[in-house]
Amino acid sequence: MKRVALALGSGGARGWCHIGAIRALEEQGVSPMAVAGCSIGALVGAAWAAGRLDALEETARALTQTGLLRYLDPRLEQGGVLRGQGVEMLFHALDLPERIEDLPRPFVTVATDLASGKEVWLREGPLIPAVRASLSIPGMLKPVQLNGQWLIDGGIVNPLPVSAARALGGEVVIAVNPNGRGGKAHWEAQKVPSVWQQIGAEKLHEQLPKALTDILPDVDESQSTPRLFDVLDVTIDILVDYVLATRKAADPPDVLLEADLTHFTTMDLFRAAEAIAEGVRITEIAQGLIREHVA
């Protein structure tokens, strides 16, 4: 069997599909030897590389709209609406190794240098800050300073890190793209409710400074007009789509699994069961192609 490496893409809550894809690959007898992850793909990839995927899946499936609030630490200052300390709390709960080099399986995460706009591969050093940097969605999560650089979401420059997976020694790269669209619109008023409404906007109003609560919508406001955070969410989706098209043309994976989760927003993290099921579905559909490349 050829050496298989995974490339797990960005996509916010849609990225829980990575868990389902890995589970389905295991059922097919495919044992990847390494993983490259970007943004949410970095979180799932790190958990898998550490042998802690079960713990992450249990946590993800247990998340509720109310429970998600404990991981949010909203602040208007410091480069993002969320500081990210709640996210780091989740990482520590998974009991991950302290350093990337301590992982049982090869792992690399992709981030973006805020100063140069260049892609940064993190293959050694502190694990949690590296993953946290790759997760730093612009405007949402505070950037991370690491190795003298301010780093943000790797999805800005490389939302599907196929090249990084090959660099880890993968003869066959299986890539999972949570952002598959199939020609569907990025935003539809009747189908995309406010992110903040879903997780309890009335509670966020209590935590956020007045300067920000003044621009947040009321919970019962009509969905006919795009809201502030919906615009930010969808803008990043559009940017990622353009970058992804270029990346796939320049360095296509051997097997590309594309999830259909257009009805998800970035912060729908409490819908893990749906996303995981979609990851299983797209991997099972591609079973023949996977076997052809791996055997």
Image (spheres, helix red, strand yellow):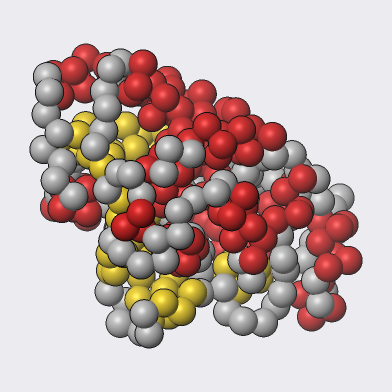
Question: Residue 48 at x, y = what percent?
Answer: 41, 39
Is there any visible trace of residue 225 in the rendered image? no
Question: Residue 153 at x, y = what percent?
Answer: 43, 64
* Quarter occupied by the N terminus: top left
x 45%, y 53%: residue: 97
Is there any visible trace of residue 49 in the rendered image? yes
Q: Quadrant of residue 88?
A: bottom right
Above or below: residue 284 compared with residue 160:
above
* Quarter occupied by the C terminus: top left
Question: Residue 156 at x, y = what percent?
Answer: 37, 64
Instruction: Say whether residue 77 is left or right of residue 9.
Output: right
Which of 149/229 is in front? Answer: 149
Which of 70/50 is in front? Answer: 50
x 19%, y 34%: residue: 4
x 86%, y 58%: residue: 203
Which of 102/173 is in front? Answer: 102
What number of labels is visible? 0
Q: Quadrant of residue 20?
A: top left
Above or below: residue 251 compared with residue 59:
below
Instruction: Say whether residue 171 is left or right of residue 152.
Output: left
Question: Residue 220 at x, y = what percent?
Answer: 86, 50
x 83%, y 68%: residue: 207
Instruction: Say whether residue 200 is left or right of residue 42.
Output: right
